[in-house]
Image (cartoon, grey):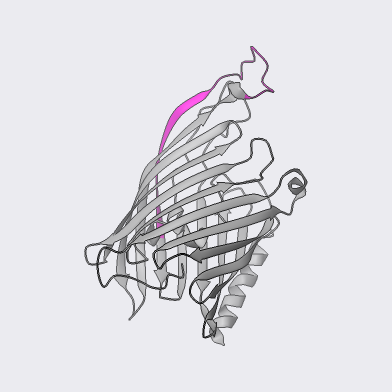
Amino acid sequence: MKLLRTIGSIFVLCALLASTTTRAQQDPMYSQYMFNTLAFNPAYAGSGGVLTAMALSRHQWVGFSGAPSTQTILVHSPVKADKIALGFEAMNDRIGATNQTSAFGNFAYRIRTGTNTHLSFGLKGGVNIYQADLASLTTVEEGDPANVNTKGQFLPNFGFGLFWHGPRYYVGLSAPKLLENKLDAVSGAVLVPTSESRHYFLIGGYVFDIGRDFKFKPSFMLRNVSGAPISLDLNANFLLRDKIWFGAMYRFGNAFGLMGQYLITDQFRVGYAFDLTTSRLGAYNAGTHEIMLSYDFRFLKGRTISPRYF
């Protein structure tokens, strides 16, 4: 099948690009990105056809002191005859002595490109509040000039996104933070980064029928940061009777894991993902846990997309 060959070619290309190596990235990673897309692509807003609320908590490298911990809340919905969609997101991300809290609004304009396909153009804008509690570190000696906290740096930012989708497939491209804000240096301390880095995301997925009650959805996320390694996630998920998702993921050179999701009702779903680190850091932690809750508020008739595949 031509479509299968095309998807296979994309995966091979992504794998080759993922071999590049440099520094680490700043923005949090998500294993269940296909259901958390608004966090990095504003054009995803309203793609489900209903008002959707989602909460996600990710605890990375459990057992490792100062490991990343991320909490995200998203709300989005189509408005004005489905051509316009609005969304809101709030995120808190802690790594060691640093903490950032952000709030962003999202706007998407959707145009019909076919009988069941839409292309969305998205914009987002908001603020990120950055803090560094260096005084809490046990390695900082009393009187050290680096023993200074960075409190409440307000870093405004904006981004854009494109999202093209049909009932069973999607492709998205986005840059959620275009401004590379400078962060104040803390008396020569090296624990605080000098600036925010610009991130680019490319995602895609397709749902295939395997049997009457069994579907297969391969998907990928390609993540690029200037001066950092290109990161690639490959996912293989299966859907049983439109109720239970289960599958596996692999992040090249970084981690592999399992994930599952259960649709308690047509509106309410619960998801869980578990990752294990493949690098040497894996010997010092008990893996990464990610829990997601999502609910569709179907107030308006005739706007529901069911079942939801992404």
Image coordinates for residue 148, horizontal then vertical, percent: 56, 19
Residue 137 drawn above or below residue 243: above
User: Which quadrant: the N terminus?
Assistant: bottom right
Q: Nearer the viewer, residue 82 or 180?
A: 82
Q: From the top left corner, tell me how far across and down residue 261 is, in percent.
A: 53, 63
Residue found farthest to the left: 80
Residue farthest top in this picture: 143
Q: Residue 32: in sight, yes or no?
A: no
Whole-percent x, y for residue 87 in the image:
34, 53
In the image, 29 versus 261, the foreground residue is 261
The percent coordinates of residue 258 (x first, y second) are 64, 62
Left or right, residue 126 beside residue 58: left
Q: Residue at x 38, y 73 (%)?
A: 306
Is 20 magenta? The answer is no
Find residue 186 and report its image quarter: top right
Q: How many marks can you see?
A: 0
Where on the picture, by quarter, is residue 252?
A: bottom right
Q: Nearer the viewer, residue 219 or 50?
A: 50
> Can I make out residue 248 in this image?
yes
In this picture, residue 94 sits left or right of residue 252: left
Q: Does 187 sit above or below residue 50?
A: above
Q: Seen from this angle, which residue lies furthest bottom? A: 1
Q: Which residue is at the front of the view, 2 or 46?
A: 46
Q: Residue at position x 46%, y 64% from top? A: 264
Q: Which residues are magenta?
A: 137-161
Decide whether residue 148 is among the magenta residues.
yes
The residue positioned 64% from the left and 15% from the top of the image is 144
